[in-house]
Image (cartoon, helix red, strand yellow):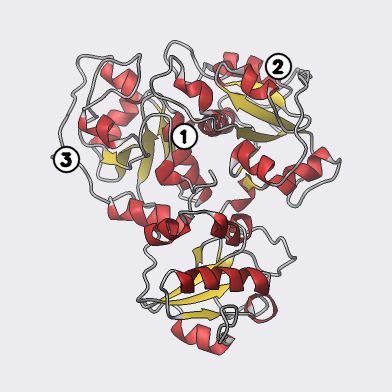
Amino acid sequence: MSMNDFAEVSTGELKEVLGHDKVSVIDVRPAESYNGWALHGESRRGHIAGARSLPAAWAEYIDWIEIVRNKGLHPRQHMVIYGHEPAQSQNVASRFRNAGYGRVWIYPHFTDEWVPDPRLPMDHLRRYSHLIYPAWIKDIVDGKIPPGHHGSKTVICHAHYRNRDAYLSGHIPGAIDLDTNALESAETWNRKDPEQLRKALLAHGIRCDTTVVLYGKYMHPDNQDEFPGSSAGDIGAIRCAFIMMYAGVEDVRVLNGGFHHWEKQGYEVHKDDVQKTAEYDFGRVIPACPRLAVDTPEAKQMLASDNAELVCVRSLPEYLGEVSGYNYIQARGRIPGAVFAECGTDAYHMENYRNLDYTTREFHETARIWNQAGITPDKHLAFYCGTGWRGSEAWFNAWLMGWPRVSVYDGGWFEWSNNPENPIETGPAQRNQP
């Protein structure tokens, strides 16, 4: 058998072993297909139930095997690989074989047999349509109506924190710049009051019925810089998405992988300063979705409730009280009773929620880690970090999964620690281990 020849699994055989703990089904299609976009006109959306996402494009990474191991895929398991194109499945299968995985098969009938048969189980990200892909935006840029779009006015926003150079150095054609300071208070980092939000959204040409596309640019933030957040526009974009949805913008979309993903496709990049066209009537009362935000009094009630959890989305050093995480926050520690959902290395990175290409982590993995920590969809969950950015991204993950009662504790560690009457906890004793 040559390196490119692998035994094939039939639909019946795959159905029989699906869910077996020694069999891993690997979906090598792009993440957007896995999440639910029917890019090839599939009659059913998403992926084979229980399949893991490992896009074929990742095979080019030098540390591909580390991605595989971090997903818990081990050589002792049987690997069944499927995708849209046979060559991609063969390529990934070869990578597995070269890495010492001796039990690798190809399933070639996903499109022609599995998808059309409603008796065969499939799964998808509940709100996948709000996590979009570059070609979706490209349709808008080209004057077309992309899948799932209602044909309404669309505003594409390049989000950044006080860093217009991030926008002017290259942005998606037609995108306007959106400084997060337009929606957040520069003093508290909380969302601005309803009247301020109304004025800011209208100034950016956004009504409640406008389709808003948000993305940012990851620029390798350094925690030692004066303003590290200026290089973390990828997180800032999701922060803006949260605030817009809280205000009442009905159709908010986030570009999965941000500007990096757009560039990776080889699409055109512009450097002009696109002028904003203001609107004059938002169309509804702000906030239209107040339950998406939790403030300190309600956060304290949630800590005392058996049906709620305050979820700390910070780095381990912040959680333990070794660092505050920010050059403008002095207090170190955490809110006692909060559940830990570690973000990554520091206040400006979300490695635990992202893939190496900056796309959102496979949602089944996030849900599994959260469940092990006691973060479950049957509770009211309020995610927080230092000032709201990382908490907003974790919240967005839960919202995309369709979890029914999810909020952002907007004040976070900054507001909590500024009140000397609020208790603070440090050390490892209360840490939740995923």
What is the x, y in percent for residue 341?
Answer: 33, 42
Q: Which residue is mark 1?
A: 392
Mark before the other along the chain sequence, 3 or 2: 2
The outermost residue toward the front is: 2
Check disc 1: other Cα within 10 Å, few if <14, some if 14-19, many if 20+.
many
The outermost residue toward the left is: 429
Q: Amino acid at mark 3?
A: Gln
The outermost residue toward the right is: 143
Q: Nearer the viewer, residue 37 or 169?
A: 169
Place residue 113 in its image quadrant: bottom right
Q: Which residue is mark 3?
A: 430
What is the x, y in percent for residue 206?
Answer: 71, 26
What is the x, y in percent for residue 363?
Answer: 47, 54
- The residue shown at (75%, 46%) is 149
Residue contact at pointers 3 and 2, CB within 8 angstroms: no
Q: CA distance from mark 3 to mark 2?
A: 45 Å
What is the x, y in percent for residue 55?
Answer: 57, 60
Q: CA distance from mark 2 to mark 1?
A: 23 Å
Secondary structure beneath label 1: helix
Mark before the other along the chain sequence, 2 or 1: 2
- Label of residue 252 in the image: none
- Label of residue 203 in the image: 2
Q: Amino acid at mark 1?
A: Ser
Q: Is residue 405 visible?
A: no
163 to 408, vertically: above or below: above
